[in-house]
Image: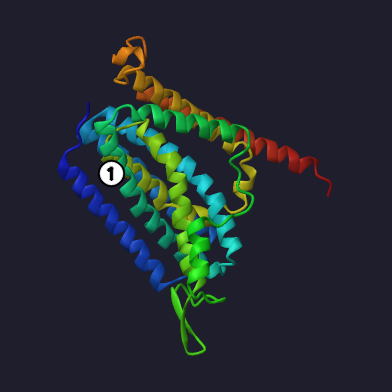
């Protein structure tokens, strides 16, 4: 079992919080629609930071911890692409002006990070006390993978959840945006703006995604710091990725199937781990199942990278063929 020094965790979290704060200040001073070049540069910077962070983990804690970080980051990053589909639909559903979308996304991502941090702390505490929860996480991922493989996870249109519908009924909400302000004055009366609903929609929707992504990352590592770091790096560049990819997301036609394979693999890994450390009375009389293998982290990395690579190449090849045969 690896151990990451406390000084490294504190230093890393402080630096990353500083980067996020700087990002917020930059957007706050100059709200705009980022160009393709600007988005590409920032996405490259965040990917580079994640790669360097993995190297730093390798130096201070060894190859196992670094492998867990890279496998977790790749998984969370690929799952975050699914978030982008829904974010795009939410922005369209609430008619958010394009010049406000960058700041809106950033605030929504910060809300998502806070909610995920709470989720991670709760998950770590539960796992430490009740190892049978690995069975539950494994089943959640296997069911999610099956739904994805069957095409039942697509969100063609955004449906407001109960919280958003309830707020609409009880709060005075104006029809128009006032920059990214949450309240505005309409005919001498203070009213909330639709921006409040948009931010809540982004945050709560991402929390629903966390029900899949958090069990997935706990299937690769049980270190709360690495779990949070992978989520942080996956979400940090999500805003720029939103503007960079644009219509490219529609070309990744096999992405959902790739994610289904990855989640299914991690689900199996979780169940095997649960069997290996079994304490449930009605499974093998409460004793560990000795034949249950532990899937090594290097194999997880190979499966994740290989699946993402194959599905991306296959997706782009299919859309290229489709474009060639379309009539002019």
For the point 51% across and 45% down, the residue is: 81
Mark 1, Cα crowd under 10 Å, few <14 / some 14-19 / many 20+, is some
Kind of element beneath mark 1: helix
Residue 320 picture quarter? top right
Front in this rendered view, residue 328 or 182: 182
Give the answer, above or below, for where 152 lies relative to 184: above
Measured as percent of width and height from the top left, residue 87 is found at 53, 55
Nearest the viewer among 45 and 211 is 211
Q: Position of residue 305 (x, y in %)?
A: 47, 31
Q: How many marks?
A: 1
Coloring scheme used: rainbow
Q: Position of residue 108 (x, y in %)?
A: 43, 59
As drawn, which residue projects farthest toward the bottom? Answer: 188
Q: Nearer the viewer, residue 54 or 186?
A: 186
Q: Which residue is mark 1?
A: 121
179 horizontally vs 10: left or right: right
Which residue is found at the position 36% from the left and 9% from the top?
Answer: 291
* Residue 26 visible in image: yes
User: Percent position (x, y) of residue 91?
Assistant: 56, 61
Q: For the N terminus, which image quadrant?
A: top left
Give the farthest residue toward the right: 327
Q: Is residue 41 visible?
A: no
Residue at the extreme top? 291
- The quarter holding residue 19 reads bottom left
**Above or below 42: residue 301:** above
Looking at the image, residue 270 lies above or below residue 43: above
């Amino acid at each position: 079992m690896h151990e990451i020094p406390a000084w490294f965790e504190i230093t890393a979290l402080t630096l990353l919080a500083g980067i996020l704060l700087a990002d917020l200040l930059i957007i706050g001073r100059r709200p705009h629609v980022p160009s393709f070049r600007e988005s590409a540069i920032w996405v490259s910077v965040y990917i580079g930071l994640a790669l360097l962070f993995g190297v730093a983990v390798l130096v201070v804690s060894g190859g196992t911890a670094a492998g867990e970080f890279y496998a977790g980051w790749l998984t969370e990053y690929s799952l975050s692409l699914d978030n982008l589909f829904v974010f795009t639909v939410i922005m369209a559903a609430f008619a958010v002006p394009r010049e406000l979308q960058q700041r809106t996304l950033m605030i929504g991502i910060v809300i998502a990070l806070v909610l995920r941090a709470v989720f991670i702390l709760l998950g770590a505490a539960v796992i430490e006390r009740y190892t049978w929860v690995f069975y539950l996480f494994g089943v959640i991922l296997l069911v999610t993978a099956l739904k994805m493989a069957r095409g039942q996870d697509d969100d063609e249109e955004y449906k407001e959840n109960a919280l958003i519908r309830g707020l609409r009924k009880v709060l005075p909400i104006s029809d128009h945006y006032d920059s990214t302000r949450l309240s505005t004055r309409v005919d001498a009366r203070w009213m909330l703006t639709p921006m409040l609903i948009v931010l809540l929609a982004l945050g709560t929707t991402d929390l629903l995604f966390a029900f899949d992504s958090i069990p997935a990352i706990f299937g690769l590592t049980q270190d709360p710091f690495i779990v949070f770091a992978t989520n942080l790096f996956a979400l940090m560049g999500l805003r720029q990725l939103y503007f960079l990819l644009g219509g490219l997301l529609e070309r990744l036609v096999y992405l959902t199937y790739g994610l289904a394979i990855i989640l299914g693999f991690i689900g199996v890994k979780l169940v095997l781990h649960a069997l290996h450390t079994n304490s449930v009375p009605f499974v093998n009389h409460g004793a560990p199942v000795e034949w249950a293998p532990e899937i090594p982290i290097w194999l997880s990395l190979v499966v994740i990278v290989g699946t993402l690579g194959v599905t991306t190449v296959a997706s782009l090849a299919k859309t290229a063929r489709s474009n060639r045969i379309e009539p002019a």
